[in-house]
Image: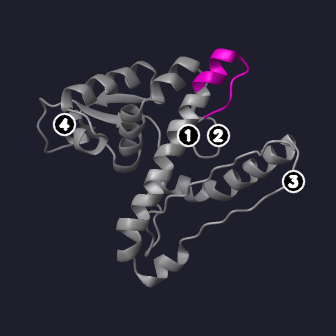
């Protein structure tokens, strides 16, 4: 597992790690840590729908795959508490060639799509009504059908990543321009069945 990609995302290649991350509580915990930064299991529990002890167990499981780490608490906080952090702001995986790997990646993909659709529905119900008109107009959605080869689909994905990479990377460098806000970019590519 490495961080060698345009976003600096954690690259998951181990099918067992994919299967572990396909659990709804683990994926929600990792997503929350990636967005909000370090937290305790107790703080995370209200956001992931599990008790603090169950959340702590899932965090230890994620740590076993190197996706999260426990470390020193932020300054001014109780040093007796265990603080967890995501090791990267995002993650990615490729569909493995083995049957076990393909099954694990399929489970992870299904949970990611489920949580992404839930986030979009929550945004529609809770966030969009309170947005300034300028930000509301900046929101977008599309449903575009392409006719491409697998290689062309990979080229498109790579071009999108290269386009977004500077905006992802400047967050890590603390280069946030005035008026900038957090935007979640959900992208789902669904190859259609051949007729």
Mark 4 and mark 1 lie on one chain; the one further toward the N terminus is 1
User: Residue drawn 23% across and 34% down?
Assistant: 41
Using the rendered image of the protein, determine whether residue 86 is visible from the camera's viewpoint: no
User: Residue drawn 39% across and 32% down?
Assistant: 26
Mark 3 and mark 4 lie on one chain; the one further toward the N terminus is 4
Mark 2 and mark 3 lie on one chain; the one further toward the N terminus is 2
Image x and y of residue 102, in percent? 66, 23
Disc 3, SS: loop
Image x and y of residue 107, in percent? 55, 29
Q: What distance separates the C-alpha of mark 2 from that of mark 1?
A: 7 Å
Q: Dot 3: few (<14), some (14–19), or many (≥20) neighbours within 10 Å?
A: few
- Which segment is the magenta one? 93-104
Contact? badges 2 and 3 (CB < 8 Å) = no
Of circles 3 and 4, which is in front?
Answer: 3
174 left or right of 168 in image: left
Q: Which residue is mark 1?
A: 9
82 left or right of 160 in image: left
Q: Which residue is mark 3?
A: 147
Inspect the magenta stretch and tell me whether residue 105 lies in it: no
User: Residue drawn 36% across and 45% down?
Assistant: 32
Q: What distance separates the C-alpha of mark 2 from that of mark 3?
A: 26 Å
Using the rendered image of the protein, determine whether residue 126 is visible from the camera's viewpoint: yes
Q: Which residue is mark 4?
A: 42
Which quadrant would the C terminus be assigned to in this image? top right
Contact? badges 2 and 1 (CB < 8 Å) = yes
Of circles 4 and 2, which is in front?
Answer: 4
187 left or right of 171 in image: right
Q: Which residue is mark 2?
A: 5
Image x and y of residue 177, in percent? 47, 70
């Amino acid at each position: 597992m490495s961080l060698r990609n345009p976003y600096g995302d954690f690259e998951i290649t181990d099918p067992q790690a994919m299967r572990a991350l396909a659990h709804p509580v683990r994926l929600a915990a990792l997503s929350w840590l990636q967005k909000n930064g370090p937290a305790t299991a107790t703080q995370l529990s209200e956001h992931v729908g599990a008790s603090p002890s169950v959340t702590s167990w899932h965090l230890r499981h994620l740590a076993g795959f190197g996706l999260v780490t426990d470390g020193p608490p932020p300054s001014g906080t109780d040093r007796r508490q265990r603080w967890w952090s995501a090791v990267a702001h995002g993650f990615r995986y490729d569909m493995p060639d083995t049957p076990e790997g393909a099954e694990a990646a399929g489970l992870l993909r299904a949970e990611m799509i489920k949580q992404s659709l839930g986030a979009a529905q929550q945004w529609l119900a809770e966030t969009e009504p309170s947005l300034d008109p300028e930000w509301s107009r900046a929101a977008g959605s599309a449903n575009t059908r392409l006719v491409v080869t697998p290689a062309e689909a990979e080229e498109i994905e790579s071009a999108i990543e290269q386009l977004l990479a500077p905006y992802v990377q400047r967050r890590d460098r603390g280069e946030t321009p005035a008026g900038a806000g957090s935007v979640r970019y959900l992208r789902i590519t669904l190859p259609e069945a051949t007729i």
